[in-house]
Image: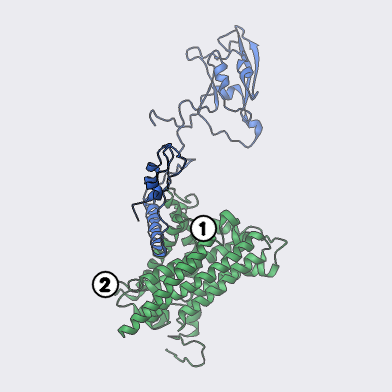
Chain colours: A green, B blue
């Protein structure tokens, strides 16, 4: 049953399942993630509409519910166009990198703890590695190759500018994002995401780590290239930024990756700051409710993403840089330092 | 924020044609007074890093609350093909030709004044004599052919102004798209037909 043998593995994993459970879990998580993306897509368009006193899509299907399906169908049936100045292999590969890293990061989000399903203990997550946040940042760093290679290999000046902006932006904000998490990790004293959730039994980290939460959220907006930090796309200045030259299925991949990244970040914020599957006030619902709680909290953060997009105008490039380096980074460092001092002083 | 900004005092001190008094030299009296109707732009001092950050944060929250206020309002969208915007009573849409209500004779006497007035040259009238057997209009002659090319019409309304018998008026229909240009040439029968009022009219005070 519990074949726990951590020897000979790179990372110590909290719990080992049979291989077939792992395969099954991978399929289910991928399928669930795939189904969530069109929902977020529709939710964004509907909510953006409501924020601007209009309806949003309401023609395809009841209340426009089939709109994302129509969009995806349209994109997939379009011609696979490639500019003559592009670098072929990289041009085809770049959207794939984006999508693969997004899906890989999605595997880490815990939807619940280990539970008995028909007598078999199954952890409701893809992976529970002892290097959780590091894994996420590793894939976040690789994801930026998707954007940079895509923009560069297009052979167009707008794409190239978008890619360069993306590179600078992701590097600047990754630091603050990481430092914002350091506070939580110091307090929880574990790098496992399920461990971090378990450590929030007394109090969610949004309360003691409010600054960390705000910094992480802001940096995450930049990391996912969402408004007001969508300088890599910047429709007004750069046509479409890194994805200017992409159309059809490749553009759909970028689009998919963007929304999956929003979901991943929502999941991480939920896990790290909002207590994952825990309920407040000592309510202990049965185990099958856990994924629903996580999804509800995730949709809350996703709503925040859409809300901010409807509200905030895009930053100027120098504003972006000075905000990242002069405001966010010192605040994140201060937060980590103060947390460290407090943890040492109280223990 | 400091209330004592030096600018308003200096503008009062700078009376027209006043010699620079040495006592108020610290208030920087300008040699030329811009006059009383010049608006002075007063800026608050640039905020420091802490206050600037706080202000950015506060204004961001204010913006978020503003959009959230729109969120639970009813959308203002007009769902066009199902709902239509009401037009004003004097809106100039597709033309209509009229008959007398009692005799059902056409009002148009084929005088071609509308065609003469038309700046786009889109009206074509061919007149014919009324006969006792075939009496079409109330006058001496009638329009045997009356065509308006709506793909050329600019909806200026000069035709209805020119008409001495109020035979042609501008209606309210504005849904005039078609797949073929020849379909946009409206004949007399089409213009005379009972108008299908598809356009809602604005009420008074609306």
Q: Position of residue A223 (x, y in %)?
A: 50, 68
Q: Is residue A81 above or below residue B76?
A: below
Q: Is residue A214 above or below residue B64?
A: below
Residue B7 appearing in the image: no
Q: Is residue A335 above or below residue B197?
A: below
- Secondary structure category for the residue under label 1: helix
Question: Which comes sooner in the sequence, label 2 or label 1?
Answer: 1
Q: At 46% from the left edge and 80% from the top edge, which residue is drawn?
A: A132
Is A303 positioned to the left or the right of B154 in the image? left
Q: Which mark is residue A281?
A: 2
Q: At 47% from the left edge and 82% from the top edge, which residue is drawn?
A: A131
Q: Which mark is residue A83?
A: none
Q: Nearer the viewer, residue A28 or A248?
A: A248
Q: Nearer the viewer, residue A104 or A62?
A: A104
| Residue farthest to the right, as pictured | A84
Q: Quadrant of the C terminus of chain B?
A: top left
Is A41 positioned to the left or the right of A212 in the image? right
In this rendering, which labeled residue sits more in front, label 2 or label 1?
2
Is B18 positioned to the left or the right of A150 in the image? left
Indicate the chain on which mark 2 is placed.
A
Q: Residues within 10 Å of mark 2 (few under 14, many from 20)?
A: few
Q: Quadrant of residue A158?
A: bottom right
- Secondary structure category for the residue under label 2: loop
Q: Position of residue B23 (x, y in %)?
A: 37, 47
Q: Which mark is residue A68?
A: 1
Q: Position of residue A307 (x, y in %)?
A: 42, 58
């Amino acid at each position: 049953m519990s074949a726990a043998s951590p020897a000979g593995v790179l990372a110590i994993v909290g719990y080992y399942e049979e291989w077939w459970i792992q395969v099954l879990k991978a399929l289910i998580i991928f399928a669930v993630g795939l189904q969530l993306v069109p929902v977020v897509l529709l939710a964004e368009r509907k909510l953006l509409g409501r924020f601007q006193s209009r309806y949003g899509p309401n023609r395809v299907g009841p209340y426009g519910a089939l709109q994302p399906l129509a969009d995806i169908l349209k994109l997939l049936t379009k011609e696979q166009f490639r500019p003559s100045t592009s670098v072929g292999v990289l041009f085809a590969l770049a959207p794939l990198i984006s999508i693969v890293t997004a899906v890989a990061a999605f595997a880490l989000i815990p939807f619940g703890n280990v539970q008995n399903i028909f007598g078999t203990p199954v952890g409701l997550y893809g992976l529970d590695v002892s290097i959780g946040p590091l894994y996420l940042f590793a894939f976040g760093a690789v994801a930026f190759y998707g954007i940079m290679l895509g923009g560069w290999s297009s052979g167009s000046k707008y794409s190239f500018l978008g890619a360069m902006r993306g590179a600078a932006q992701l590097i600047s904000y990754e630091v603050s994002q990481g430092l914002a998490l350091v506070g939580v990790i110091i307090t929880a004293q574990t790098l496992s995401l399920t461990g971090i959730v378990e450590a929030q039994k007394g109090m969610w980290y949004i309360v003691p780590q409010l600054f960390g939460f705000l910094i992480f959220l802001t940096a995450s907006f930049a990391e996912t290239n969402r408004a007001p930090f969508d300088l890599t796309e910047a429709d007004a200045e750069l046509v479409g930024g890194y994805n200017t030259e992409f159309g059809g299925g490749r553009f759909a991949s970028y689009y998919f990756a963007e929304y999956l990244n929003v979901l991943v970040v929502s999941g991480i914020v939920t896990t790290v700051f909002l207590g994952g599957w825990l309920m407040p006030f000592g309510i202990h619902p049965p185990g099958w409710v856990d994924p629903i709680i996580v999804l509800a909290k995730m949709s809350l953060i996703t709503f925040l993403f859409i809300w901010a997009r409807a509200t905030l105008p895009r930053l100027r490039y120098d504003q972006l840089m000075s905000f990242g380096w002069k405001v966010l980074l010192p605040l994140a460092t201060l937060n980590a330092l103060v947390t460290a001092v407090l943890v040492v002083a109280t223990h | 924020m400091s209330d004592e900004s030096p600018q308003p005092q200096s503008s009062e001190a700078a009376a027209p044609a006043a010699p620079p008094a040495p006592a108020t030299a610290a208030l920087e009296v300008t040699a030329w007074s811009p006059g009383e109707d010049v608006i002075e732009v007063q800026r608050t001092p640039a905020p420091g890093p802490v206050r600037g950050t706080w202000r950015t944060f506060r204004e961001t929250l204010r913006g978020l609350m503003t959009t959230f206020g729109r969120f639970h309002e009813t959308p203002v969208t007009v769902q066009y093909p199902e709902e239509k915007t009401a037009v004003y009573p004097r809106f100039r849409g597709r033309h209509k030709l009229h008959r007398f209500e009692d005799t059902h004779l056409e009002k148009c006497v084929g005088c071609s004044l509308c065609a003469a007035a038309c700046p786009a040259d889109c009206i074509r009238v061919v007149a014919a004599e009324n006969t006792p057997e075939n009496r079409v209009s109330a006058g001496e002659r009638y329009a045997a052919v009356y065509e308006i090319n709506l793909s050329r019409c600019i909806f200026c309304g000069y035709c209805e102004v020119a008409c001495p018998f109020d035979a042609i008026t501008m209606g309210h229909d504005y849904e005039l798209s078609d797949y073929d240009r020849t379909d946009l040439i409206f004949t007399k029968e089409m213009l005379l037909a009972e108008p299908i009022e598809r356009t809602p009219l604005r009420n008074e005070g609306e």
